[in-house]
Image (cartoon, rainbow, N blue to C red):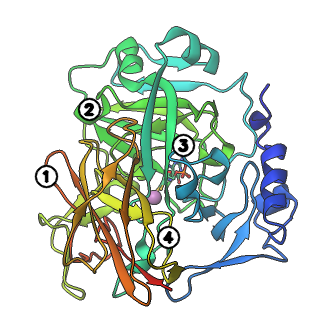
Amino acid sequence: MNENNSGINRRGFLKGSLALGAAVLVNPNSLWAGQAPSMAQYVDLPFERGRRPLVAFPGKRPLMAMTTRPPQLETPFHIFNEDIFTPNDAFFVRWHLANIPRDIDVNTFRLTIRGRVHQSLSLSLEELKTQFEQVEIAAVCQCGGNSRGFFQPRVSGGQWGNGAMGNANWKGVRLRDLLQKAGIEDDAVQIRFDGLDQPVAEATPDFRKSLNLDDAIKKEVLVAHSMNGDPLPMLNGFPLRLVVPGWYATYWVKMLNDIEVLNQADQNFWTTQAYRLPADPCHCLQPGEALTGTIPIGKMTVRSFITNLENDRTIPGGKPCTIKGIAFDQGYGIDRLLLSVDGGQQWQAAQLGKDYGDFSFRPWEAKFIPESGHSYALQSLAINRIGESQRFDARWNPSGYLRNVIETVNIHAT
Ligand SMILES: Nc1nc2c(c(=O)[nH]1)N[C@H]1C(S)=C(S)[C@@H](COP(=O)(O)O)O[C@H]1N2
Ligand SMILES: [Mo]
């Protein structure tokens, strides 16, 4: 059995820890139980209260810990420059509830499909892997609140930098194949997904998310058992998770063990109260303005990042400087990437790199020759195949979702 199945990938854990000599070395089990790290290396995100200790959880290299119980771990941004696919042991982690199984018995685990179906199913992992077509897709998993820490004025919620996202190759079975096997009733309207994690306090609602039937039966929606060729890490939802390419990660239910076909719209807390956007077309508000209607968060906005140069970096003047980055959208695919070195006055076309599919990070690259003694405000602007682009103004909403303003990286040439 793969060592990931035990919940502790010792090799990954040790490798990660050694690579960052001074990072926290703690007993992963006590850490999982919520013990604070005793000694840590820190990363400072560029906003107030942005200091994060680097903490190594089971199966993970040291990541930026926002909270340890439940685990909320951010990927250090330089990782996005190293590989277009985010390594499993560096992939961000977000759980709402602290009661998360630490071990899964793969022999007794079952995925249930029930509700408005002709025949309920209870499938073992073996059955899932052998009785249904296996499909693999590259897709970005991004928290709706990614980059929330940059909101001005500040909003409450997890203060993520830009690392609450990752790109992976997800492999599993199509949700629609499972639903077809069970046979859905004519009155089905939504599908609800539940995982094995539980609230600690009884009053806290269990984490569940639902999709409309039309969205759930898209061919790219998977029940995935593997990520970048390996079983899912425990913290990313071992043994199964929903993969909803193009949609914010809140729908990507982890440790998925229950799929329920509903004949009316789901009224559970996580659908009706949490993860809502202002209903207007811009999904934004003026700070202080009252919320009128809300709608559930859905698909992702167009974004791009410069990955090889961080803010305030000094580079040599008078010779070509390569700027590298990534871009992604909700699945139309990236059509163009424009780069500015003067804070958005003039734009040049960047070269798009290899296309790994419409839901993946798309690499890009551009060059320019900086003049000695000058400073440059680098900006990248992605446009997708239906002409949607990033925003020039940072729209604001009270939950800190959807950020896709054009980001700026200031550099100085010596
Ligand atoms: N079972 C379960 N699935 C879940 C969550 C959760 O709390 N419990 N959080 C969701 C949210 S809000 C996010 S951002 C993603 C994070 O996925 P990751 O931890 O694999 O990066 O998981 C989603 N799936
Ligand atoms: Mo999230």
Q: Amino acid at mark 4?
A: Leu
Q: Amino acid at mark 2?
A: Leu
Q: CA distance from mark 3 to mark 4?
A: 33 Å
Look at 46% across and 79% down and name the residue there.
317
In the displayed structure, would residue 363 be above or below residue 134? below
SS category of the residue bearing label 1: loop
Q: Please report contact status of discs 2 and 1: CB closer than 8 Å, yes or no.
A: no
Residue bearing the label numbered 4:
309
Q: Please report contact status of discs 3 and 4: CB closer than 8 Å, yes or no.
A: no
Q: Is residue 156 visible?
A: no
Q: Earlier in the sequence, mark 3 or mark 2?
A: 2
Residue 37 at what x, y percent from top left?
Answer: 80, 73
Q: CA distance from mark 3 to mark 1?
A: 33 Å
Q: Is residue 241 visible?
A: yes
Q: Amino acid at mark 1?
A: Gly
Residue bearing the label numbered 3:
254
Left or right of residue 126, residue 135 in this image:
left
Mark 1: few, some, or many residues within 10 Å (few <14, many ≥20)? few
Point out which mark residue 213 bears.
2
Look at 68% across and 43% down and name the residue there.
234
Mark 2: few, some, or many residues within 10 Å (few <14, many ≥20)? some
Q: Earlier in the sequence, mark 3 or mark 1?
A: 3
Residue found at the very far top of the displayed protein: 131
SS category of the residue bearing label 3: loop
Q: CA distance from mark 2 to mark 1?
A: 27 Å
Q: CA distance from mark 4 to mark 2?
A: 43 Å
